[in-house]
Amino acid sequence: MGMSVSQGEHTPLDVLILAAGLGTRMRSSIAKVLHQLDGRPLINHVCRTAAALAPQKIYVVVGHQGEDVQSAVLSELYEEQVEFVWQHKQLGTGDAVNAARELLQGSESTLLVLSGDVPMVRPETLAALIQHHHAHRGRGAACTVLTVKLKDPSGYGRVVRGDEGLFERIVEQKDATDDERSIDEINAGIYCFQTEKLFATLSKVQNENAQGEYYLTDVPGLLKAEGEDVAIYKHGESREIEGVNNRVQLADLERIVNRATISKMMLDYGVSFIDSKNCRISSEARIGRDTIIHPGVTIEGKSEIGDGCEIRAGTRITDSKIGYGSTILDNCLVINAEVGRNCTVGPMAHLRGHAVMAENAKVGNFVELKNTKLGAGSKASHLTYLGDATIGEKTNIGAGTITCNYDGKNKHPTEIGNNVKIGSDTMLVAPVKVGDGAVTAAGSVVIEDVPADSLVAGVPAKVKKKFESDSGSGS
Ligand code: UD1
Ligand code: MG
């Protein structure tokens, strides 16, 4: 904003987001605006866009599963930015706006009305709408409707233009004549209003229509009939205003967002995709140059993957960091984990619960790390569970090792030092410590701490030998 010289520019901006509906056409027991696009609820997309305009306040009309919608909104916005308005019965979009009457009707603000189910609109587009609204005929409009031409306008409200192509009214698909249905300019469900005029006219909206609802879409037509200026801001990018009313539309948007994310990664960040159509990458993820992503990879949340990594087929990485030069082999699950540089993970490994691998570490097939730190150069190559463990550097964890961290009530830690060799099938009954340079024989059940530079064996494991060597203890 800031280009207009009209007075209106100085009126403060409020945003009202309609998000109380169930979304019958989703055929879901979850409120429509809570369905996810690009890993975040639809309502969060709209809230983030609204916040980018820095309005005085963002009002969100909630109703269906309103508490859940509120917590979704508060995961995106600060409490001071937002005010919730309850619409207990969903009697239509006009009634939804009316729920905010007490809070807004006397306000001298400009009110931007957004739909919680139109998630792709960009802040730049809304800023242009607002500017157009204020600049209309040099004095600003009472209302400006955001419209777009669609190849297939079915389902949307159509914008009827009268003499000289001026705005006349909006007619909903279900109330439209065949002629009106052939109009391809649609109402995006996004409007700017002079707040006072909106509420004055909203009182006159009736529900005598095909759906028996109070339509917000009647307000621009009523304003026009009262001699007010109603402007149209016709936008060129139809994708931005696509609404989500059913799961087909949701899947279409998911594909569009995902494709845009992947294209950006390829063109701007130098990431290779072997099969770009068959990967799902969060738009909030970061991937480094010359990293190769194989088919069927999913990268979620704010994951960060360094340069020169290779992520093989079927792996999912969520909210995790992967250092440069690391390879995640096929079919791994990496959630809330941190993998250092030049590590190898998998195939079929599971890192979770703040698992951390330092540089040059290796985790092999059927290995699970939970809340465990594996030190630099250390390896757990086969069939192992390491939970609540801290493992030093250059230690080898033999096949089939288990940290028995759970006694049925509480979790206990295991500490393993540097240069340790844990023999195959060792059970480490936590809490327990294994000193630097120690060795456990295959099949040991370790129930008490193992001193540095010693060999333990048996069930329960006993010290069998002390090493003279300098295998890594403190020296
Ligand atoms: C609405 C418009 C239509 C426009 C389309 C654009 C009306 C009557 N129609 O239709 O002209 O082309 O959006 O996407 O406005 N909501 C409430 N309370 C209610 C009803 C709805 O909060 O009582 C909320 C919904 O949660 C949703 C939004 O308002 O986020 C839009 O409602 P929806 O039922 O999706 O309207 P559309 O049929 O898409
Ligand atoms: Mg809709």
Image (cartoon, rainbow, N blue to C red):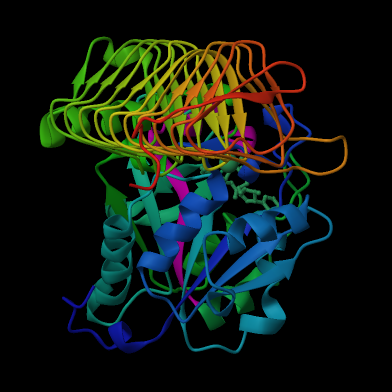
Q: Can residue 270 be seen at all in this image of the molecule? A: yes
| Image x and y of residue 234, in percent | 29, 50
| Image x and y of residue 104, in percent | 61, 82
Q: Nearer the viewer, residue 246 or 222?
A: 246
Whether residue 392 appears in magenta in the rendering, the answer is no
Residue at position x 35%, y 28% in the image: 361
Q: How many marks?
A: 0
Q: Nearer the viewer, residue 379 or 317?
A: 379
| Image x and y of residue 464, in percent | 61, 21
Specify the quadrant of the image occupied by residue 378. top left
Q: Is residue 32 above or below residue 98?
A: above
The magenta region covers 172-194
Q: Quadrant of ligand 2?
A: top right
Q: Is residue 310 above or below residue 394?
A: above
Q: Quadrant of the N terminus?
A: bottom left
Whether residue 187 appears in magenta in the rendering, the answer is yes
Q: Is residue 436 above or below residue 137?
A: above
Q: Nearer the viewer, residue 458 or 42?
A: 458
Residue at position x 26%, y 58% in the image: 124
Specify the quadrant of the image occupied by residue 132. bottom left
Residue at position x 47%, y 50% in the image: 45
Q: Nearer the viewer, residue 405 or 466?
A: 466
Query: On the rendered structure, is 5 left or right of 149?
Result: left
Query: On the rendered structure, is 61 left or right of 266?
Result: right
